[in-house]
């Protein structure tokens, strides 16, 4: 492995420049105006994979193309096969005024690279590609066969990928899927994530009068949709932070003793946590630590509220409508379909007769959990220690990667979640960044991983 690791060390400056090129593409999947940018980013990725020495192609979908890239292999290869998953699409950069520098003009400060998509997920998936480049360019044989699947719709629910997996199942059957799209508590605390929360999104819209009304002439005689929506939203969660929807907690399991022991290894200073987020005090489900609340307990969050006049000054109206974008984060044993039924039934019960309610259900994804004591999990933990120089830990992640349940369902493969992002990398927020130390150690981790997995 020395020749591979020496190659990574020698070329790390070039790798950083290439990451800068990658993040310059405003590949925002949520905004139709960036369709051409997504296509251009994918073409760059295709060219880059071919230059590395991979057999690469773009697979068109009804949405954005999916890149498939394979390591060189002999016909009839008997090596174990692994899939490496990532995504080239990114979150919208708004609000732009909160960025220190433009989101798609990469800036390096100290050991951090600032740009939208730097950690979520371009830096993380590029680390795996660069590790494979080190093998190919040094003529070092990989002990396993690899197929990269990098999509362009993860941030909008991976709409095209499920169908793609079914259509290409025979080609993609594998021992496991390796994903770096999660995080670690600190540079000296690398982690294997063994559980993810699921997700269910929806938009709730209340309609009242057929137009905005003068609040002086008509106010008091008709219900205000904005007020009605706030009251309705307030009934979805109680004062102790528990979701108030009947049947919501069906099947939710308590943490095991082993899990609680691992949770205690994660450094957590609640005062610093408050300061980091800029809040005066923490709030969450009563009876659980803040770490448990954000990784192992289900939640409801209002993501956006819209109603009435939003311009400068005042406009005295009763708005005609009001809407709220809502997401639920779900934990293992919760089913998004069951939650949806429970929610709709509850909303119909509590919606006042003075307004009309319309609910638009968005994307959803199952929670995910895998054994943290399997042979592959142990191989991953050994690799993390070798790459980062510290004992790794096992952790749950509060976010969602809906496609991991499809990997299990279609490919019958578990996912090894080896995240490289730090807590202050600001994923989905202004001034997103990626640690260049994590980038470099992540490449080393990836290079070593295939050696360890080949032994399992």
Image: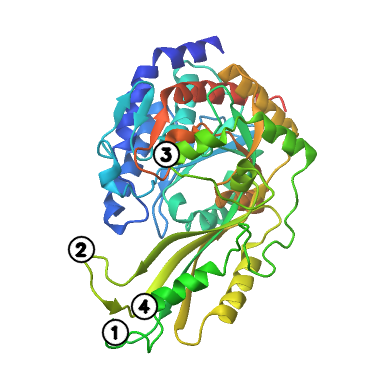
Q: What residue is shown with label 4?
A: 321
Say whether residue 170 is visible.
yes
Cβ–Cβ below 8 Å for labels 1 and 3?
Answer: no
Q: What residue is shown with label 2?
A: 312
Q: What residue is shown with label 1?
A: 211
Q: Earlier in the sequence, mark 4 or mark 3?
A: 4
Cβ–Cβ below 8 Å for labels 2 and 4?
Answer: no
Disc 2: CA contacts within 10 A as few (<14), some (14-19) or many (>=20): few
Looking at the image, residue 17 sits to the left or right of residue 298; the answer is left
Q: Earlier in the sequence, mark 2 or mark 1?
A: 1
Q: Nearer the viewer, mark 4 or mark 3?
A: 4
Q: Identify the secondary structure beneath mark 2.
A: loop
Residue under the point 60% across and 43% down: 290
Q: Earlier in the sequence, mark 3 or mark 2?
A: 2
The picture places residue 93, in percent across and down from the top left corner, at 32, 47
C-alpha separation, residue under disc 4 versus residue under disc 1: 8 Å
Q: Earlier in the sequence, mark 2 or mark 4?
A: 2
Residue 278: quadrant of the picture:
top left
Disc 4: CA contacts within 10 A as few (<14), some (14-19) or many (>=20): many
Disc 3: CA contacts within 10 A as few (<14), some (14-19) or many (>=20): some
The picture places residue 358, in percent across and down from the top left corner, at 46, 78
C-alpha separation, residue under disc 2 versus residue under disc 4: 20 Å
C-alpha separation, residue under disc 4 versus residue under disc 3: 33 Å
Q: Earlier in the sequence, mark 1 or mark 3?
A: 1
Residue under the point 59% across and 54% down: 198
């Amino acid at each position: 492995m020395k020749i591979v690791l020496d190659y990574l060390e020698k070329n790390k400056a070039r790798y950083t420049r290439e990451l800068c090129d990658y993040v310059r593409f405003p590949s925002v999947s949520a905004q139709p105006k960036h369709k051409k940018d997504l296509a251009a980013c994918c073409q760059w990725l295709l060219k880059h994979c071919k230059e590395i020495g991979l057999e690469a192609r773009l697979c068109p979908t009804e949405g954005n193309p999916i890149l498939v890239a394979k390591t060189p292999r002999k016909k009839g290869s008997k090596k174990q096969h692994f899939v490496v998953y990532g995504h080239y699409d990114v979150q919208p950069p708004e609000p732009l005024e909160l960025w220190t520098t433009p989101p798609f003009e990469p800036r390096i400060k100290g050991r951090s690279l600032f740009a939208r998509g730097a950690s979520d997920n371009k830096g993380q998936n590029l680390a795996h590609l660069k590790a494979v480049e080190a093998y190919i360019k040094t003529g070092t044989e990989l002990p396993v066969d690899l197929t990269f699947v990098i999509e362009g719709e993860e941030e909008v629910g991976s709409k095209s990928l499920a169908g793609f997996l079914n259509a290409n199942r025979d080609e993609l059957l594998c021992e496991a899927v390796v994903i770096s799209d999660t995080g670690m508590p600190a540079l000296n605390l690398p982690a294997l994530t063994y559980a993810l929360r699921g997700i269910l999104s929806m938009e709730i819209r209340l309609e009242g009068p057929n137009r905005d009304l003068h609040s002086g002439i008509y106010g008091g005689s008709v219900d205000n949709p904005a007020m009605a929506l706030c009251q309705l939203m307030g009934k979805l969660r109680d004062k102790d932070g528990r979701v108030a929807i009947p049947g919501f907690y069906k099947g939710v399991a308590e943490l095991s003793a082993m899990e609680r022991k691992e949770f205690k290894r994660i450094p957590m200073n609640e005062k610093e946590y408050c300061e980091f987020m800029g809040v005066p005090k923490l709030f969450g489900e009563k009876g659980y630590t803040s770490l448990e609340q954000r990784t192992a307990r289900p939640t409801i969050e209002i993501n956006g509220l819209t109603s009435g006049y939003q311009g400068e000054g005042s406009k005295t109206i009763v708005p005609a409508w009001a809407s709220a974008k809502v997401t639920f984060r779900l934990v293992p044993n919760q089913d998004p379909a069951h939650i949806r039924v429970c929610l709709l039934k509850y909303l119909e019960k509590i919606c006042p007769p003075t307004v009309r309610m319309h609910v638009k259900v968005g994307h959803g994804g199952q929670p995910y959990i895998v054994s943290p004591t399997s042979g592959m999990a142990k191989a991953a933990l050994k690799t993390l220690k070798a790459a980062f120089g510290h004992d790794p830990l096992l952790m749950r992640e509060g976010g969602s990667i809906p496609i991991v349940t499809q990997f299990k369902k279609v490919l019958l493969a578990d996912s090894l979640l080896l995240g490289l992002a730090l807590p202050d990398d600001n994923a989905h927020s202004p001034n997103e960044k990626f640690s260049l130390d994590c980038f470099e150690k992540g490449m080393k981790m990836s290079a070593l991983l295939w050696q360890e997995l080949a032994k399992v």
